[in-house]
Image (cartoon, rainbow, N blue to C red):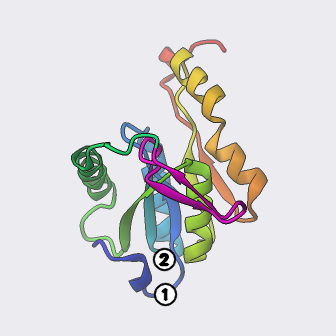
Amino acid sequence: MSMPPERFSGPPPLLVGVVPGQHPEVLQTAVTLAQQLTAPLLFAYVDEASYLVEWDPARSTHRLSLHPDKNDDDIRSVTEDLKSVIVSAVRPGTPTEWTLRTLAGDPARALGRLAAEVNAPMIIVGTPERGFGHRITELLNGSVAAWLTHHQSRPVLVVPFKMPAHEEQPE
């Protein structure tokens, strides 16, 4: 059942970074771990395209949206899709509480701030899938997992993409 993060009963939630089309191992691992630890799950999707207004405490300045006219329906559609994927991962009948938050800005920094806000004991993220396009994205954006492990003190669980052996390609 979905609940706002402030209403979680018991321990603070495990924070899980989610993106559309993410490999299923991330959700499977997060759900299994949450059940073993009897911890709630806080899924977070960071919409990089809608910087809207991100406050940067280090600079005390506002960064305005790169795409101020971005359609809210786009974000709503992505959020609904993510919710349905989460609902199927958190099987009915399990006691795991969860909620989904949509954030704006740089994914690593937004996840780091949210983890601090809710006192998450751990941040769970996936690795990018292999391939040329993913390497370019990784190079341009930097790795969310790498940034998190170097710039904040919480444990970060990086869930690898398990490609079927017959599809594996040499690096």
Query: For the magenta stretch, what is the residue range?
Result: 46-65
Foreground mark, 1 or 2? 1
Residue 108's spot in the image, x, y percent? 61, 50
Which mark, by number, is residue 38? 2
Instruction: Say which residue label 1 marks.
Output: 10
Determine whether the residue tagged by mark 1 lies in a helix, strand or loop.
loop
Image spot of residue 105 (x, y percent): 52, 50
Tag 2 secondary structure? loop
Q: Is residue 6 magenta?
A: no
**Image quarter of the C terminus:** top right
The residue at 55%/66% (across/down) is 114
Residue type, numbered disc 2: Thr
To which quarter of the image does residue 122 belong? bottom right
- The tally of labels here is 2
Q: Is residue 24 above or below residue 118?
A: above
Q: x and y percent of residue 146 in the render?
A: 71, 44
Q: Amino acid at mark 1?
A: Gly
Marks 1,2: beta carbons within 8 A = yes
Residue at x-position 27% and y-position 58%: 87
For the residue pair 15 and 87, the one nearer the viewer reads as 15
Q: Earlier in the sequence, mark 1 or mark 2?
A: 1
**Residue under the point 57% across and 74% down:** 117
Above or below, comparing residue 27 to residue 127 in the picture:
below
How far apart are labels 1 and 2 at the CA level?
Answer: 9 Å
Tag 1: Cα neighbours inside 10 Å, few (<14), some, or many (≥20)?
few
Residue 4, x across and y down, in percent: 36, 77
Q: Is residue 49 magenta?
A: yes
Q: Quadrant of the N terminus?
A: bottom left
